[in-house]
Amino acid sequence: MSGKPELLYFAASGRVIPARIALFAAFGKDGWVNETLDFSQFKAEKEKLANGAPDARLVSGALPQLKLPSGKTFCQSISIARWACIAAHHNNVDTKNLYPIQNPDHFITMDEACGFAMEILDKCPHDSDADAKKRKREEYAADTGFMGKAMGILEKRMAEYPGEFLLGGDPCLADFVIYGLMIMVNSGNFDYVPAAYLEKFPLLFKHMDAVKNCMWMKQYEEAYGKSP
């Protein structure tokens, strides 16, 4: 054990961005470990878990996961991010408005947005048949589908506080959760939901650049030479 929280994920971004930002905000450049593995290593670890190997590293067969200094390991990217933010508050680390527990209205706005953005990812339909998958994804992203409705709510929330971010002038945890979803769609990695889909949500589309260029992202990139 390093005595530091140890994050395990792929050398990629997406849904792990909020966790990496929160760990960086809470523990600084050198106060946590950002460990990565490739897909072949991940496959081998999944097999170990399935076979009950005593040295299996995975808890649930999915990533990310975080090993605490206590030795216990936990999963779920948003749970990891929340843990880091609470640790920062406990240690009197100023994370600005990243996790606004001091303002109940801000907090529920943030938490609701985290929930909707993660639900869009988690409820996204899959199918081994390409045509069926395409149909299900298009229905999912339509105005009457869950993704369309949730994106509409997030777009509405973006207009409720003056400023570039969900809560106004400073980014909160939800901004990074939303950003991870948006760049997935914008980069074409959300199958059968084209990048042009985001044009229906101009505030969310504009929000991508604000998060990409915000203080936490810039400081993270300066510290590690790469994006979270």
Image: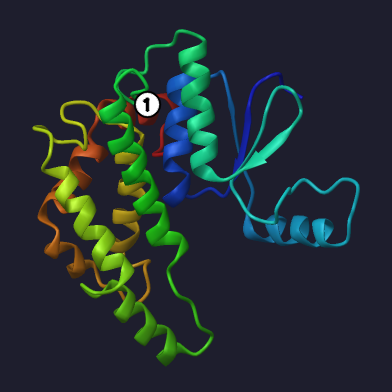
Which of the 4 image quarters holds residue 48? bottom right
Residue 140 percent coordinates (x, y) = 33, 74
Position of the C terminus, as image quadrant, is top left
Q: Residue at x 30, y 47 (%)?
A: 179
Q: Secondary structure at mark 1?
A: loop
Residue 217 percent coordinates (x, y) = 32, 32
Q: Would residue 6 be found to the left or right of residue 181 on screen?
A: right
Q: Does residue 136 lie above or below 26 as drawn? A: below
Q: Is residue 154 visible?
A: yes
Q: Would residue 186 be found to the left or right of residue 9 on screen?
A: left
Q: Does residue 174 lie above or below 71 as drawn? A: below
Q: Which amino acid, mark 1?
A: Tyr
Q: Residue at x 55, y 19 (%)?
A: 30
In terms of depth relative to the viewer, which is nearer, 58 or 189? 58
Residue 216 percent coordinates (x, y) = 32, 27
Q: Is residue 28 visible?
A: no
In terms of depth relative to the viewer, which is nearer, 2 or 104? 104
Other residues around mark 1 within 10 Å, as few (<14) / some (14–19) / many (≥20): many
Residue 204 percent coordinates (x, y) = 18, 51
The residue labelled by disc 1 is 99
Q: Would residue 91 be found to the left or right of residue 138 on screen?
A: right
